[in-house]
Amino acid sequence: MMDLPDAMDAVGFKYSAKFARKWFEGKAHVIEDESKVIEPAEFVDKDTLKLDWILKIGTVRERYAHLLATGLKPSVEENIYNSRAQNILVGVLSKFIAQHNNYFSGTLDTLIECGGDIQVLHQRFQFQHVLVSMLNVLGGVPRIADKKVRDAEVMNDLAASLANFNLYAAIATAKISTSQYMRYSTPWQSCTRTKVEITHIWAYAKDSYSFNDKTSASQYLGHWNRRGVIVAYDAFAAQAASEFSAQKISKNFVYEDGNEPRPYLPPVPEQLNKPVDTGNSMKEKEVFYPVRNRDFRNWRDVKKRGGDFVIYSNCEKVKLPTPMVIDLGEVCKEYKP
C-alpha cells in the first residue's frame, strides 16, 4: 500500500500522489458518506484542485453542462432549474430570512456571509449537485473498452484522486426584497413577504477522500504496482452492473470483480480475481495487483493511521442567463403594539 504514492508519481499523477501521502501520513480519521460535519482544517484540502482542470478530464464537462443546463423539464434530475432544486432553494432562503427576523432587503453575497469559509457556504447555501462517476472521469465505456486491461493510458490523475465525486451548485449572489404590511383581522397581524432574485451561483467540485463502500462490492481502484497502474475495463462493467442490480433487481446479487468469491452474472473475468501479469513472465515490473476501497480501510485498521479528508476545488462564479426568482411566501405573526 505504501508504494502507491510513488507509483502515482511514476506515471505523473501529481495530485493523487499528494492526496495519497496526506491520507497515509494523517492520523486515523473516518468521514462517513453524506457527512454534514464541519471538519477541522487538517482534514480539508481546498487549494489543490482547480475546476477548469477537472472539467477537461473525460466526460466531466458533460455532467457540468447537465447541472447548469437551461430548458430542461422540471422533472429532470440533477439540474439547478428542476423542481426539486427550487424546493430546496425555498428552504435554504427561508432559513436565511428567518435568521434575520423575517426581514432582509439588499444584496446577499453568500461567501461574505459565510466568512469566506467554503465548508460553511456548502452547508448553508448549496442546493443542487450532479454525480460524476468513475466512468465519466475515464471518458466513458467505449474508451475504457478500447484500451482494455493492458493499457495504463485509460487511468488519469483525476480518477486516481477522486474516482466518483459530485459537482455542486450553491447560491452566490441574490437580490432580496422584503415587504412589510398589516392584516387588520382579529387579532391584528404583522406580515412580511420576501422575494429573491438569484443572479449568480457558485459551481465547484467536492469529494471526501475516503474509502467507504455503499454495498458489499468494494469499489475497484485499478491494478497497481510500485511503477504504475493499469485498468481492467471489465471491472467497471461489473461495478455498473452491481449498482444497477442493487437499485433495480435485488441486493442479493452483487457484481464485484476480484479478490473474493461472490455470485456473478456473467462469471467474473479471470484476470480480475488475481494479480495481472502483463508480460506473462512474472517480472516484478509487469505484475499489477488489484486495489479496492477495503484495502485502505484494512490498512488503517492495522496501522492506526489513515486520515480521511474533504477536497474542494475552487469555486467558479457563474452568472445565470436568466435570474431565478423565488417567492418565499407570506410570514405573519400577531401584532402587539
Image (cartoon, grey):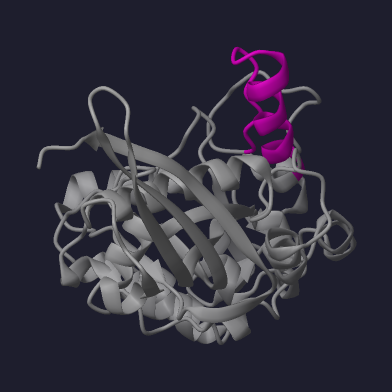
Work out which residue is located at the far front of the displayed protein and give it: 184
Above or below: residue 121 compared with residue 184: below
Is residue 241 one of those drawn in magenta?
Answer: yes
Residue lying farthest left? 337
Residue nearest the observer in this picture, 263 or 14: 14
Answer left or right for 46 relative to 174.
left
Residue depicted at 69% across the width and 76% down the height: 57
> Where is residue 295 shown, x and y percent of the image?
39, 47
In this rendering, does residue 278 appear at all?
Answer: no
Report if residue 279 lies within the magenta region. Answer: no
Q: Is residue 315 left or right of residue 47?
A: right
Residue at figure coordinates x 22%, y 77% from the top left: 115
> What secondary structure characterizes most of the magenta part?
helix
Of residues 260 and 144, the one drawn nearer to the viewer in this rendering: 144
Total residue callouts: 0
Which residue is nearer to you in this view: 194 or 21? 194
What are the residue bounds of the magenta stretch? 237-257
Residue visible at 51% across and 84% down in the picture: 50
